[in-house]
Image (cartoon, helix red, strand yellow):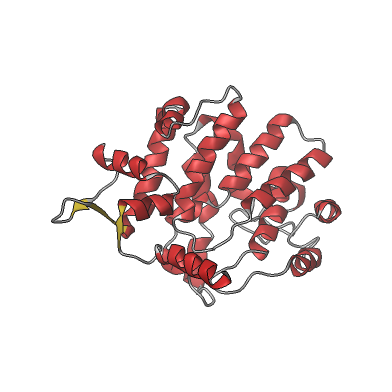
Amino acid sequence: MKKKKENNKNNGSSLYKKPILTTKEAGKLLKVGVQTIKNYIYKGKLKSFKTPGGHHRILRSDLPTQIKDIFMEELKNGTEAFIKKDNIELTPNLHETYLIIIKALAKALEIKDASKERHSDFAVNCALKMAQRLNLTEQERENLEFATLLKDIGKIEVSERILEKPGNLSEEEYSIVKRYPRIGEKIVGEINFLEDTKPLIRHHQEMFNGKGYPDGLAGEDIPLGARILAIAGTYQALISDRPYRRAFSKEEAVRIIKENSGTQFDPKLVDLFLSIV
């Protein structure tokens, strides 16, 4: 049974390397139904070509850029139309409606991320628990939740060759990676309800000692939400597999965060995080 599960996992990850995809395979990558993929093709939103037998095929290399464009267009055209496209009921709770849209937008990044387990739900829950302990307002908690899900969206503009590199990045490659928080800020910049998440997305890689990026902010000059996100996001990254390393255990991840208290992370927030974990 264990062997069968491993084979299924390998089959799923192999889709990231296939140059040509069927509509079913494209749907599996994007986590949408085959009919949704066909709708995108029929409406000219997704490029495809036909086999001699009349079946649609999609170039894997077309997906990252195209899917971002599709989601951005959908978002700009209005939330209700976007949600109804996949027969999702429009919830009377506006926060839940926005959350559905954000999770759909975040799929654009998953296409390019070879990590098998993102632990995003844990990161969201952790960040929200910290926010609750700090008595942040409901609006501030919502902004933090949205930013946690979208913090890495800017990586969609970073080459897969760099994101999936198993060894150390060169200086030039690292400089490219450091642009992604600004790119993420730009991606959400034209979406009105994400206006207050922009500073959190831009600054979640700043360090408490001022040695982070993109702006080298230090201490309390870094927005509080970004300081929370830095801890929750780092923990999420540490316990996830990466192309260049295996996941750390939760105990090891906690130790690493402790060691970086006061340098990379706000020490008061680290103490709060540890009390929750």
Confirm whether residue 221 shows in the render: no
Residue 126 percent location from the top left of the image: 74, 49
Q: Residue at x 58, y 41 (%)?
A: 198
Confirm whether residue 256 shows in the render: yes
Q: Residue at x 51, y 36 (%)?
A: 101
User: Is 248 in front, or is 162?
Assistant: 248
Q: Residue at x 49, y 42 (%)?
A: 104
Q: Residue furthest top?
A: 92
Residue 8 percent location from the top left of the image: 48, 65
User: Is 150 in front, or is 84?
Assistant: 84
Q: Is residue 146 above or below residue 61?
A: above
The N terminus - image quarter: bottom right
Along the horizontal axis of the image, is 18 left or right of 113?
Answer: left
Q: Residue at x 31, y 54 (%)?
A: 62
Residue 51 percent location from the top left of the image: 17, 56
Along the horizontal axis of the image, is 215 left or right of 46?
Answer: right
Q: Residue furthest front?
A: 1
The C terminus - image quarter: bottom right
Along the horizontal axis of the image, is 231 left or right of 107?
Answer: right
Residue 110 percent location from the top left of the image: 49, 54
Q: Residue furthest left?
A: 52
User: Is 242 in front, or is 34?
Assistant: 34
User: Is 174 in front, or is 80?
Assistant: 80
